[in-house]
Amino acid sequence: MKLSRLRFIKTYKLILIVIFSLQGCAHSQIYKVDEDYFFRVTSSDSSGLINKSDTFQMKITNSLKLAVLGLQKAEWTNLATGEKELRGITNNAKTIEIEPPYKLLHGFLTLLAPYPSASLPLGIGYSFEATHSFYYSDFKEKGVTQTTTVKSIDSLLFHGHKISTWFFVGNNNSHFKKYGKNIIEYWFNESIGFIKWKYYFPNGKTITFEKL
């Protein structure tokens, strides 16, 4: 009897966590469930020459499994090939963090740099560190330590208008010996979200996401 009661309490708590997580996601002012978001994704070589350019679609949906972790599901699609990849997104009133695709980019090195992430309220000089353990990559045992800093207030041209943004820079603090320093720069606006983010790799190559 006590065991059944304990199981009921645990199940009830889990249901509450899922409900509150989904409610928190629903209150997001930026990314909406069942809406499509499009990004131009370009790859450039060490000389700055673009050698690949595709349009990626990101669609947000609720997931009971991910809601326990405070996440929603982000389905990425390469519109040129039809290939898809499921990732997560933290999407609430305090924190916005997108997990970009990495399999669609045919490599895992983008995992070394932090995700595009913003925790409100923001301020210049604010810095945060995290260690991610990726169970689907070379980093599943030791994890990757990453640091991100709000560098400045910047502006970007978006849909013909100059938009004020927060400018972030992040990089890995581990795995230097094998993979070097992998850097991400990104621009965030509280109303639009992540307008642009760019990965810099030690070999001089870059990958850029730009919101369309």
Image (tube, helix red, strand yellow):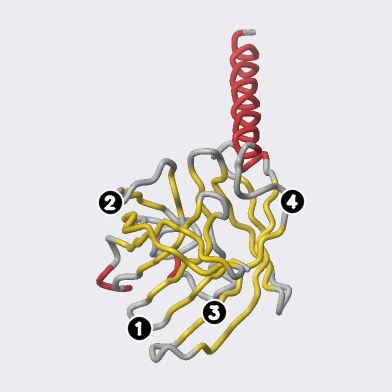
Mark earlier in primary sequence (2, 3): 3
Q: Secondary structure at mark 1?
A: loop
Picture coordinates of residue 23, whole percent (x, y): 64, 32
Q: Secondary structure at mark 4?
A: loop
Mark earlier in primary sequence (1, 4): 4
Q: Residue at x 33, y 73 (%)?
A: 179
Picture coordinates of residue 20, whole percent (x, y): 61, 29
Side of 130 relative to 26 (left or right)? left
Spatial CA distance of label 2 from label 3 is: 29 Å
Q: Nearer the viewer, mark 1 or mark 2?
A: 2
Q: Can residue 145 be seen from the camera position used here?
A: no
Q: Residues within 10 Å of mark 1 (few under 14, many from 20)?
A: few
Q: Nearer the viewer, residue 68 or 178?
A: 68
Q: Which kind of residue does numbered mark 1 sit on?
A: Asn
Q: Which kind of residue does numbered mark 3 sit on?
A: Thr
Which residue is disc 2 drawn over?
Answer: 125
Relative to 172, does residue 33 appear above or below in the rendering? above
Mark earlier in primary sequence (1, 2): 2
Q: Which kind of residue does numbered mark 2 sit on?
A: Gly
Q: Which kind of residue does numbered mark 4 sit on?
A: Asp
Which residue is disc 3 drawn over?
Answer: 42
